[in-house]
Image: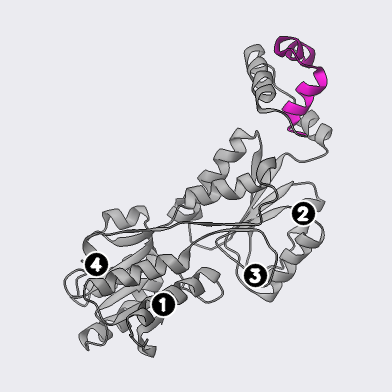
Amino acid sequence: MSRKDVAKLAGVSEATVSRVMNNVGPIKKETREKVLRAAEQLGYELNALAQQLARQKSGNLGVVLPHVPKVHLFSTYYFSEILSGIAEVARKQNIDLLMVFQDPAKQRDYTKLFRSKKIDSCIILGSTDSEEERTALQELTDHSYPFVIINQRYAGMPFRFVDGDHVYGSYLAVSHLLEQGSKRVALLNGPKQYSNSIDRYNGYLKALHERDIHCQEQWLVEGNYSRRSGMNAAKKLAGLIEAGEIDSIFAANDRMAIGAMEGLAAHQLEAGKHYRIIGYDDSDGAKIVTPKLSSISVPFYEMGVKAATMLLDDKHREESHAIMPVSLVIRQSSI
């Protein structure tokens, strides 16, 4: 079947069929659906190479991911949910995804992906606030290459981003612990190179200050968002609990919370009995660990959808950012 056959069945011009199949230019929704129905009915598929040549684009949406040795990114709740959201929008737009793994030890050069025609736009995950990263992102901006960052913001920089309302989420978590009777809440946070770590700290402080509680230096413990770092922090946390210096823990993600719970169990300290704990992300692990982990639910899937929509949907191309709402999920570990 040819483009001419599709045009005849849909009642439109061949040029309109070409624009719809190549996803070029503004097309009325009704017209697009009519052409796609006709193409499906006739079994018409546009040759992928011809499609790329017609648009002089790759047809790929790039997703930049951090390369983390010994970590299976696609099995982690955070990445799998975001990628699922991105993929759903790309599928509907007939766009392919190109996964690009960024080695933290190598120099950043995102523009190379665009110059080589590998991608037409990109979503960046796992970025950190460093001078090198800022320079690489500024180069994308200077060349007007379209990109969106997920779960990282850069103060004073005009980069487009999608993020969760982590200040409020942390405020909710710590407020909940204090309302349950806790008075000395430890913060098991991630590195400050991530904006969401700073957000969690600010939300934590806000909840304490509202109740005239002064944050103590020993209450602040740092991990790296891994389960192992939570286990490593457990020795210090156990000492604080046993000394009566803390009575609860707010962990910046569920992986660290679960690791801390495992490590504290080795000290015969049980969540919900000897201390309260609440995590962040509301991952699958929070629902199956014993006791079940209270957590802040973050709409990672919707964040992926939003980021891809900002790049692929004409109606949203002018949006500069989006802050997605979060919510508190209460389970046994914090009551």
Say if mark 3 contacts mark 4, CB within 8 Å.
Answer: no
In the displayed structure, 308 sits above or below 236; it is: above
Q: Amino acid at mark 1?
A: Lys
- Read off the residue under disc 2: 145
Q: Is residue 204 left or right of residue 44?
A: left
Distance from disc 3 to disc 4, alpha carbons, whole Å, reads 39 Å
Q: Marks 1 and 2: CB-CB under 8 Å?
A: no
Measure the alpha-carbon separation of dots 1 and 3.
36 Å
Which amino acid lies under the numbered mark 4 shown in the image of this protein?
Answer: Ser
Tell me the amino acid under the disc marked 3: Ala
Please tell me whether mark 1 sits on a helix, a strand or a loop. helix
Marks 1/4: CA–CA distance: 19 Å
Residue labelled with disc 3: 105
Q: Nearer the viewer, residue 290 or 335?
A: 335
Question: What residue is rendered at 43% in x and 73% in y?
Answer: 203
Visible in this render: residue 212?
yes
Residue nearest the observer in this picture, 30 or 159: 30
> Is residue 87 in the magenta section?
no
Tag 4 or tag 1, which sits nearer the N-term?
1
- Residue 209 location in percent, x, y? 38, 82
Q: Secondary structure at mark 3?
A: loop
The image shows residue 333 at horizontal and vertical percentages of 23, 65
Indicate left or right for 285 with 124 as reference: left
Say which element carries label 4.
helix
Which of disc 2 and disc 3 is earlier in sequence? 3
Residues drawn in magenta:
2-24
